Image (cartoon, rainbow, N blue to C red):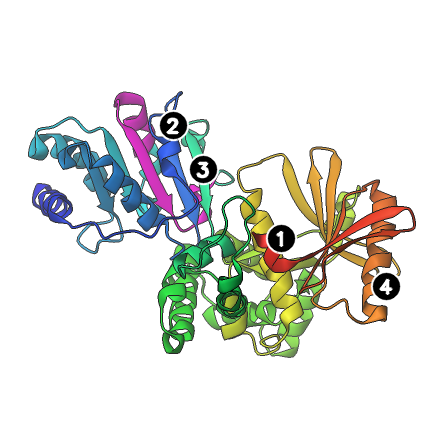
Amino acid sequence: MDDTIKAILYSWYEKKIPSILPRDINLENYIDIKPRKIIAITGFRRTGKTFLLLDLLNKLLENKNRKQEVYINFDDERIPQKTEFLTDLIPSIKQIFQEEIIHLFLDEIQNMPDWSRWLRRIQDNEAFQIFITGSSSKVSSKEIPTELRGRCLEIKIFPLSFKEFLKFKNIKINKETLKYSENEKTKTVKAFDEYLKYGGMPEVVLATEDKKSEFLQQYYGTVVRRDIVERYNVQNEEGLKAMMRLLLNSTQYSISQLYKTMKSLNYEIGKTTILNYLNYVESSYFTYSLPIISKKVKDQLQYPRKVYFIDNGFINTLSTRYTKNNGRLFENIVAIDLLRKYSQNNNIELYYWKDRTGKEVDFVIKEDLKIKQLIQVCYDVEYYDTKKREIDALVKAGDELKCKNLMIITKDYEETEQIKNKEIKFIPLTKWLL
């Protein structure tokens, strides 16, 4: 075991850290926080968790000894998935490097056996700070093992925001007004069209046009195989993939409807299995679902849930039904941006609203017991009937939920209108994102 650890440690010692494009997330804020916590960086595969760690390491190594800042990637095929490897790791680092560890960075550790119990022991008995990453919810605050509760602080990583996307494209934004300059306008419109279509997965953003869809399909294949099928030992892989295709071609789902559709396609899958599959897919961070807002728990369980995907690129690349549907792509961007915005606020909950006549509001933002904001997403409000439908639903929901903060996110219409003693703010999506 010592030889394997030695090889991995010297690989790290000799590794040249690549230059990293900056993100809005600053991990320096979490260095040596009090009380001392394990910093758990979670999120979908390839969203940039490893590069955030390496960026932090670059900054730390400006003033510190590399032997005291140790990084290990548990996706390394040389690492045996055995508890003994973890048991031997810290003593071996100290013996080989002959230095006290200051920070320990553990990438994708959740696949190791007994990882959480080992982390608990190390956290309790060592003085250095630990950063971990994970591409499954095993590391998240919802599923973190009992022995680590209270010892971890979770930071959720999403694909690039539009603001970060523009930075990656080297398009300048005025920091004071968050607006782009006139001479950048054409580039920004083109960039938004790309962001709408291919999303914000960092490697995809930097790829040439002919490689973007290929990368997205590879990511999809990896998450299905490694984060769902292998992790949960799914026996009916074809049934799982069929269900995921149904989700990609839907805006909402219910267990009963999925069951009926799967049965009509000759997939023998029970409702309990479908529910398990849905949980597996969400645990990989590939999808997020929103329930209807209701005081009755029964309603939240029985009504369909709206489904959103971690990145627009997957809808565009994998869906056969919504590829050209800008309305769905707009709404998905808003959903992920809201999840990103409120990811560190445990008091915020997201829902949708719908009444018995079919009127619907896309997003209800609830903070504690109060409704903070209602948001509609409407790609084009140019047509009177479309605009009236969105307004009527928003006004009715505002009355029912006692909320005055009403917004409609549009393609390019910007105005504040007074309707039925209600103030409704219309804002273009690009401006809202910035």
Q: Residue furthest front?
A: 183
Identify the residue shown where x is 40% and y is 48%.
23
The nearer-to-camera label among 3 and 4 is 4
Residue placed most toward the observer, 258 or 413: 413
Q: Earlier in the sequence, mark 4 or mark 2?
A: 2
The nearer-to-camera label among 1 and 2 is 1
Residues at marks 1 and 3 touching, judged by CB atoms closer than 8 Å: no
Mark 3 falls on what kind of element?
A: strand
Mark 1, other Cα within 10 Å: few <14 / some 14–19 / many ≥20: few
In the image, which disc is placed on residue 154? 3
**In the rendered image, which quarter contains the N terminus?**
top left
- In the rendered image, residue 340, in percent from the top left (x then y), is placed at 54, 47
Mark 4 falls on what kind of element?
A: helix
Three-letter code for the amino acid on which mark 2 is drawn? Lys
Q: Earlier in the sequence, mark 3 or mark 4?
A: 3
Magenta stretch: give its range: 118-140
Three-letter code for the amino acid on which mark 4 is drawn? Lys
Left or right, 155 with respect to 101, comes to right
Q: CA distance from mark 4 to mark 2?
A: 51 Å
Report which quarter residue 427 is drawn in.
bottom right
In the image, residue 133 lies in the stretch drawn in magenta: yes
**How many numbered marks have been drawn onto this rendered protein structure?**
4
Three-letter code for the amino acid on which mark 3 is drawn? Glu
Q: Earlier in the sequence, mark 1 or mark 2?
A: 2
Q: Earlier in the sequence, mark 1 or mark 4?
A: 4
Report which quarter residue 83 is drawn in.
top left
Please determine whether, in this image, residue 308 is positioned above or below residue 369: below
Q: Which residue is mark 2?
A: 37
Please determine whether, in this image, residue 191 is positioned above or below residue 368: below
The nearer-to-camera label among 1 and 3 is 1
